[in-house]
Image (cartoon, rainbow, N blue to C red):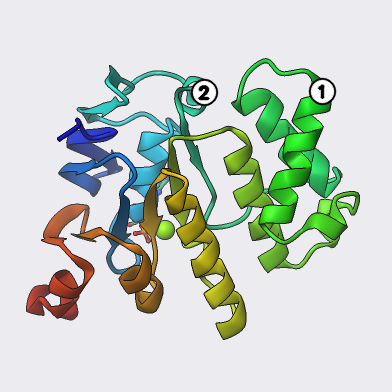
Amino acid sequence: MSAPILNVVELSKTFGGLKAVDALTFAVEQGETLGLIGPNGSGKTTVLNLLTAAFPSDSGRVTFDGKEIAGIPAYRVCRAGIARTFQLVRPLKGMSVADNVLVGRIYGAGAEPIGPARKKVRELLDLVGLGGRAEMPVDALTYIDQKRVELARALAADPKLLLLDEWLAGLNPTELEAGIMLVRSLKGRGLAIILVEHVMHAVRSLCDRCVVLTAGRCIAEGSPDSVLANTEVKRA
Ligand code: ADP
Ligand code: MG
């Protein structure tokens, strides 16, 4: 078996006395979709923030693609191959939809001439269903469409590991099925994914394995069906 793409060992983060992530250990295999689930405030977003160096961890080791990444700056984490979307969207306001994604391409993926970069942006906008809206100001999009921009911007960095923070939340049933198919197609391209999600139907249909958090600690790990049937998990 090949080594995991991501290996997290005893990762911890405290905010003013509150242990948001508490000696958490888990791994993501190559091409695997790992569900990170748990109640609000259990530390899911903080885990993603620590992995992407949005802020430093207090302790712990993170190895990605064979290299230690704890302590390296966010732009280098991105260029190493980890990209994310934000639970609360963070579009670059005042810029077009296409330019939002182009920024992800130019700063995230490294040196590339502008022509091929724009071509890649068009492909990604088609993929996320925004092909016809490339030149619109990003601020004019609905919240859900801004989430699509976030996904395209993350993919523009050519990640090996994609972190989705409740990306499927708020979609109507039709959009949800389309969103699940889209995430499945990314998985089909060999991308490893950490899916932070409350929509259990999506967790069941997409995740190979789940890690369940409460108060920053893992209380269960295993297949979606086995963890969702676990009594401690149901209570949480
Ligand atoms: P989840 O994504 O599972 O809902 P979070 O990771 O956002 O949980 O939050 C875990 C805990 O850490 C919560 O109690 C939250 O209030 C706290 N927290 C998260 N980020 C910060 C921060 N930047 N400053 C202070 N407290 C934070
Ligand atoms: Mg969160």
Considering only vertical position in the picture, is 99 above or below 131? above
**Please, is residue 99 above or below residue 231 in the view?**
above
Q: In the image, what residue occupies the spot 10% across and 76% down?
A: 230
- Left or right: where does residue 120 sit relative to residue 226? right
**Mark 1 secondary-structure assignment:** helix
Q: Position of residue 118 (x, y in %)?
A: 80, 33
Tell which tag, 1 or 2, sits nearer the viewer.
1
As rendered, which of 134 and 10 lies closer to the eye?
134
Image spot of residue 134 (x, y percent): 85, 50
In the rendered image, the vertical position of residue 4 relative to residue 178, given as above or below? above
Task: Quadrant for residue 190, please give it.
Answer: top left
Q: What whole-number distance in Å separates the C-alpha atoms at marks 1 and 2?
A: 18 Å
Q: Is residue 147 left or right of residue 187?
A: right
Up the image or down, 183 lies above or below 19; here it is below
Q: Indicate which disc, 1 or 2, sits on the residue closer to the N terminus.
A: 2
Tell which quarter ligand 2 is in. Answer: bottom left
Q: Is residue 51 left or right of residue 141?
A: left
Outermost left residue: 231
Q: Is residue 236 visible?
A: no
Q: Secondary structure at mark 2?
A: helix
Q: Residue at x 88, y 52 (%)?
A: 137
Kindly tell me whether residue 79 is visible in this rendering.
Answer: yes
Q: Amino acid at mark 1?
A: Ile
Q: Count residues near mark 1 (Cα–Cα under 10 Å), then give few for <14, some for 14-19, many for 20+.
A: few
Mark 2 vs ligand 1: CB below 8 Å: no
- Residue 42 sits in quarter: bottom left
Residue occupied by mark 2: 79
Classify residue 232 as left or right of residue 83.
Answer: left
* Residue designated by label 1: 114
* Kind of residue indicated by mark 2: Arg
Please give the name of the residue rendered at 80% of the width and 63% of the height, measured from the top-left corner: 141
